[in-house]
Amino acid sequence: MHTPHDIEQGLPETVSLLDKLRMAIYHGELGPSQRLVETELAAKYDTSRGAVRQALLQLENEGLIIRPPNRSASVRPVAPQEAIEITEVRAVIEGLCAAKAAAVATEADHAELRALVRQMADAVRRGDMLADSRISDLMHAKIREIGGQGTANRILERLRYQDVRYQFHVSLLPGRLAQGASEHYGIIEAVIAGDPVAAEQLTRDHSLVQQLVDSGDLESSAAAHHPNANIITRAVGAAPDLVIDSVEGKILAGDIFLLASDGLTRLLSDAEILEELETSDLEAAGNRLIDICLGRNAPDNVTFIIVKTHPA
């Protein structure tokens, strides 16, 4: 776990007070609804109250804090719906930047991107979340620079610090560091390969829905109906390293396992699937599941495997 001191020591000495406060909010050192007392901030950052007041005014303009009349400023909480909207907007803009970069990246750009991939891989091996977050920012900044999207860059910088709950806290989830790195590798590979379509899709497909569920910004019950619920970030061949989910448990005779694409799970509830699988004839159950999907005008591919264990 990184302390506020760790975060501050990781910043260049030339970083301004404003940037330090932005980063403190971004990394959760200054949490949602936390009061921002001018005298305390001035002492912490060894500066004047006037400088703190000016920084807080700018942070208010950026939507990061609120300053009610006659009361101390505080960090503005990001509501779940707003977090979802920010994530969706960022995905679209970042995807555009990646597509533009893939179309114009030079050999020199490729070399810089590969160097960042190596740095990220090293950070993941060390479990260094702060370094990984910094390198992720550098990767996206480099892609935006290559694509020449100045306007997009300004918009994303503004959104970046508002997206506190999603951006940094998701990286604390088990396995998320390696998964995030794998997603970045796929994006970089697509840019280097000069494939704008793949670069845009992989960038937009930073598992929008699942990561929102993981971060607590979207209830799992609402995920199936989210407009981007079919977006994926992990697929064979999408990145150098494939991150695989795994679970452990005791297998008993008669247990049934279903591996399915979301073409099935978006059309049938868990209860409906269970009802069909409880028949002793699994082939008939499989055919019945397909029939139900077709009857509901399946808009996507429906693929699944059913396995039943037998006594030894």
Image (cartoon, rainbow, N blue to C red):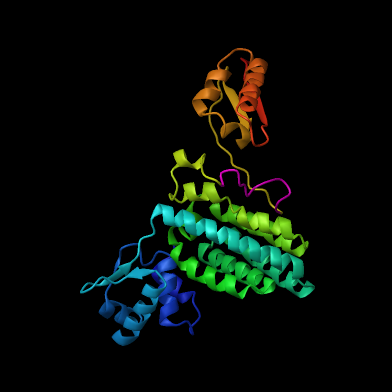
Decide if residue 48 is on the left or right side of residue 290.
Answer: left
Q: Quadrant of residue 116?
A: bottom right
Q: Position of residue 312 (x, y in %)?
A: 63, 16
Toward the top, the furthest residue is 280
Q: What residue do we see at 44% from left, 62% from top? A: 164
Q: How many numbered callouts?
A: 0
Out of 201 and 179, give the one closest to the viewer.
Answer: 201
Q: Position of residue 199 (x, y in %)?
A: 70, 59
Q: Is 95 situated above or below 151?
A: above
Q: Is residue 47 visible?
A: no
Q: Quadrant of residue 245?
A: top right
Out of 21 and 90, give the one closest to the viewer.
Answer: 90
Provide the major secondary structure of the magenta segment: loop
Out of 307 and 201, give the one closest to the viewer.
Answer: 201
Magenta stretch: residue 75 in it? no
Out of 184 and 195, give the one closest to the viewer.
Answer: 195
Task: Give the magenta-colored segment's residue range.
Answer: 228-239
Q: What residue do we see at 60% from left, 36% from top? A: 262
Q: Is 204 situated above or below 26?
A: above
Q: Position of residue 140 (x, y in %)?
A: 61, 67
Q: What residue do we see at 48% from left, 56% from top? A: 85
Toward the left, the furthest residue is 70
Q: What residue do we see at 60% from left, 43% from top? A: 230
Q: Is residue 33 visible?
A: yes
Q: Position of residue 268 (x, y in %)?
A: 55, 28
Quarter holding the N terminus? bottom left
